[in-house]
Amino acid sequence: MQKIDNSLHGCLLKQIKGKLLVLREQQEIQLTQIKLDHPNTYWDNRFIIECSKSEYSVGKLTLLEYIQKRDRFDLSELSLIVDNSHKLILFTIPVIKSLEKIVAIPHISYYDETELEGALKVIFRPHFISRFTHFL
C-alpha cells in the first residue's frame, strides 16, 4: 500500500499509523496578527477565539518563536497522537500574543499569563463554503 503524503486545497494529507492526518499548510495561514477586540474572532477560517480581554491578538507560531520557547512547550501528548508530525501541527494552531510575546497556545495547554486560562476559549469550527453550493 502506498503511503499518503500530499497537498490538497491548502491542507496536507499525511498517513500516520494507518490513519489519515489532515492539517493546514503553513504557507496558507496569513502572518498578520488579528486583534482580539471582539468577543468572538474567527482565525484562519477554522477557529473561533473567545477572549474577554481586548489587549491580545491571535496569529501563528513563527520558527524563531518556536526556537526561543521550545523548552517550555510540553508536546508529549501531541507527539503520541500524531507520531512525529506534532511540530507540523504546532505551526498551524492559534497562538495568543501580547504585542510580540507569546502568552498562550491553548491546544498544548501553554499559558505564560495564568489569568488567560479562564478568559480564553478556542473552538475548532471550520468556516467552509463549498464551491458547488451555487449550483443548488
Image: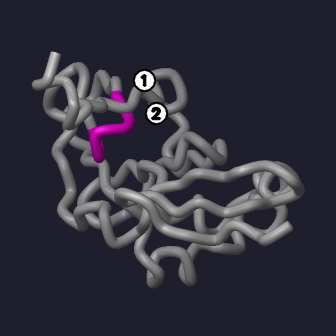
Give the quadrant of residue 60. Answer: bottom left
Q: Nearer the viewer, residue 114 or 22?
A: 22
What residue would you read off at disc 2? Answer: 116
Q: Residues within 10 Å of mark 2 (few under 14, many from 20)?
A: some
- Where residue 83 appears, x then y in whole percent? 84, 62
Specify the farthest residue to the front. Answer: 135
Give the quadrant of residue 17. Answer: bottom right
Label 2 residue SS: helix
Q: Is residue 54 left or right of residue 70?
A: left
In the rendered structure, does residue 47 fall within the stretch colored magenta?
yes
Q: Is residue 100 left or right of residue 17?
A: left
Q: Residues within 10 Å of mark 1 (few under 14, many from 20)?
A: few
Q: Residue at x 56, y 70 (%)?
A: 6
* Marks 1,2: beta carbons within 8 A: yes
Magenta region: 43-49
Q: Identify the disc placed on residue 119.
A: 1
The image quadrant where one finds the C terminus is: top left
Specify the farthest residue to the left. Answer: 134
Whether residue 108 is situated above or below residue 1 in the rendered picture: above
Instruction: Calculate the distance from the C-alpha at mark 1 to the C-alpha at mark 2.
Output: 5 Å
Residue type of the residue flagged with mark 2: Leu
Q: How many labels, in total?
A: 2
Label 1 residue SS: helix
Residue type of the residue flagged with mark 1: Ala
In the rendered structure, does residue 90 fall within the stretch colored magenta?
no
Q: Is residue 85 left or right of residue 61?
A: right
Q: Nearer the viewer, residue 56 or 33?
A: 33
Specify the farthest residue to the top. Answer: 136
